[in-house]
Amino acid sequence: MCGRMNIDSKLCPVISKLFSINFSTPTNDNLSPGQTVSTIIKSNGNFHQLNADWGIKPDWSKRLLINSQSESVISKPTFKGAIRSHCCLVPSSGWYEWRTENGKKQKYLFSNSNDEP
């Protein structure tokens, strides 16, 4: 995953209904690491919206980290604390992957065929 997402505010009513919250997010058709993203967290047994920065920036790293392998995330020092106690849901309309075609990078949007989150 390249870390770029498509966020469409049209998903807000669906997310609001699913989690019984007033979810709100602006449309961003190319959200990238470092930008603010609307997430859903569970606190004290209830769901809440939390606007957070997209990515993890450890003190030792010069750049944001956005990917980890599911097989090792629980054992990696950078991610193990976050995966145990700071999980969140990032509702999105889709995500992008890149492929080089004719010497140029081309991004492709992957999304649900029925336009649901």
Image (tube, rainbow, N blue to C red):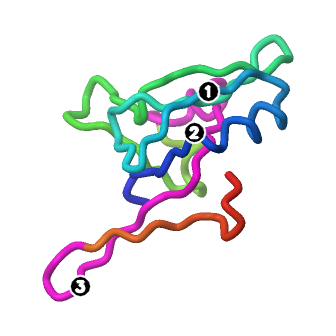
Q: Secondary structure at mark 2?
A: helix
From the top left corner, tell me how far across and down residue 99 is, in percent.
31, 77
**Mark 1 → mark 2, Cα distance in angstroms:** 7 Å
Q: Secondary structure at mark 1?
A: loop
Task: Say which amino acid is labelled 3.
Answer: Glu
In this view, the mark in front (2 or 3): 2
Q: In the rendered structure, are the residues bearing label 1 and label 2 in contact, judged by CB atoms less than 8 Å apart?
A: yes
Nearest to the observer: residue 63 or residue 32: 32
Q: Earlier in the sequence, mark 1 or mark 2?
A: 2
At horizontal 48% and vertical 32% (from top left) the residue drawn is 37
* Residue 59 marker: none
Q: Quadrant of residue 35?
A: top left
Q: Is residue 102 above or below residue 113?
A: below
Crowding near the residue tagged with mark 1, few <14, some 14–19, many ≥20 C-alpha atoms within 10 Å: some
Crowding near the residue tagged with mark 3, few <14, some 14–19, many ≥20 C-alpha atoms within 10 Å: few
Task: Say which amino acid is labelled 2.
Answer: Ser
Q: Secondary structure at mark 3?
A: strand
Residue under circle 3? 101
Q: Quadrant of the N terminus?
A: bottom left
**Mark 1 → mark 3, Cα distance in angstroms:** 36 Å
Q: Could you tell whether 78 is left or right of 92 in the image?
A: left
Q: Earlier in the sequence, mark 2 or mark 3?
A: 2
At horizontal 13% and vertical 83% (from top left) the residue drawn is 103
Which residues lie in the magenta part? 77-105
Q: Is residue 7 above or below residue 21?
A: below
From the top left corner, tell me how far across and down residue 20 is, in percent.
85, 26
Residue under circle 1? 24
| Label total for image | 3
At horizontal 49% and vertical 32% (from top left) the residue drawn is 26
* Residue 9 marker: 2
